[in-house]
Amino acid sequence: MIPGACERTLPGKSSPTSHHRQGNRPSGGITAKRMSHQQPQSILEELPGDLMIWVLIISELLVFGAGLAAFLAVRMTDPTGFAEAQTHLHSTGAALNTIVLVSSGYLAARALQFRRVSRRTAARYAVVAAAALGVVFLVIKGIEYGDKAGQGITYETHPFFTFYYLLTGFHAAHVVAGIVLLLLVAWRDEVGNIEIAGAFWHMVDLVWVLLFPVIYVLA
Amino acid sequence: MRADSLDRAWIILIVLSGGSAIAASLAGVGFDRRIAAIFVLLFALIKGRIILSRYLGLSQAPTWQRGFTISLTLFCLLLLGLYMIPAFMV
């Protein structure tokens, strides 16, 4: 019998397949029909976790997506200037930051798995380690910004740097928010809390994965 | 100890990040930048799909996973198109 099938049968009403449960073994077709009753009632129920975090994730992706598309659209007016400006960036540091963030995301995902099987201490360690890698990301980013400041490069130097500071700065602000969220859920470690903070952190990770090639490689 | 799907996802993400760095460095030493751009965006697309699927759990929601994959693919194609236009004009 499929787990949960009984819960979906209303009291006092017999299930269309109840005669199978009383005696005959259900055929594959009947099993498939029963399975169709197990499908989520709406497509929104299919989404893992809280619906609102997905609204946030999609909104953020649209905002950053528009920013990246605008960056490349403005680049069309001065491709040589954008290419020259990009030579001032630390692509190695940014590539290292990609590894830092995807590793941090791994730890956040692992923390949720640990918490789901009630390994609370392991989950807390994983969440704190994910937040610590977030701090490493910010330190590398800070070194990069410090280097730009040392070269006298500001957001007004070239349109490339206007987008660079806008997009990477906005992303760094999300990293800060994500670190705060992760530390909060290390303290209040309910499964739902870790799931939501983890989803936010993965969104930050996803944005960086798209932002890195456009800002640091393609220009 | 056998690696589970999360371990595999993380390893693939690290490998693809290295692949992006290599493609970027090849473009700096004379390799065709347009081809390098295709690889870099392809790697970004695959990485994005893995994060959505394995980290965010969309592998449990195939309809949404398909929707996100299609949207990400179209977005990467848009980025590639915007990148290529000046390359063909030069």
Image (spheres, coloured by chain):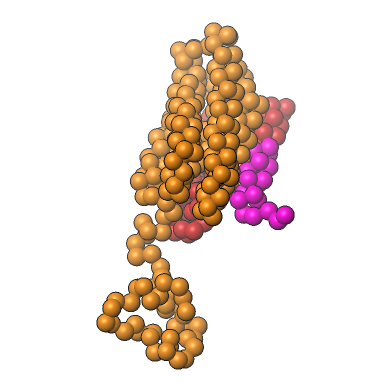
Chain colours: A orange, B red
Q: Which residue lies furthest to the left in this view?
A: A12
Picture residue at 44% right of the left edge, 83% below the top? A30
Q: Position of residue A146 (x, y in %)?
A: 56, 14
Q: Give the range drawn in magenta.
A: B1-19
Q: Which residue lies furthest to the bottom in this view?
A: A23
Q: Magenta stretch: dominant SS?
A: helix
Residue A108 forms part of the magenta stretch = no
Picture residue at 58% right of the left edge, 45% below the top? A122
Lateral position of residue B44 relative to residue A30, left or right: right
Q: Where is residue B48 in the image (x, y as percent from the top left)?
A: 54, 44
> Which is nearer the eye, A214 or A37?
A37
A145 over A219 or under it: above or below: above
Q: In which quarter of the image is residue B29?
A: top right
Q: Where is residue B53 in the image (x, y as percent from the top left)?
A: 53, 52
Residue B5 forms part of the magenta stretch = yes
Quadrant of the snapshot with the C terminus of chain A: top right
> Which is nearer the eye, A189 or A214?
A189
Lateral position of residue A44 relative to residue B61, left or right: left
Q: Is residue A141 visible?
A: yes
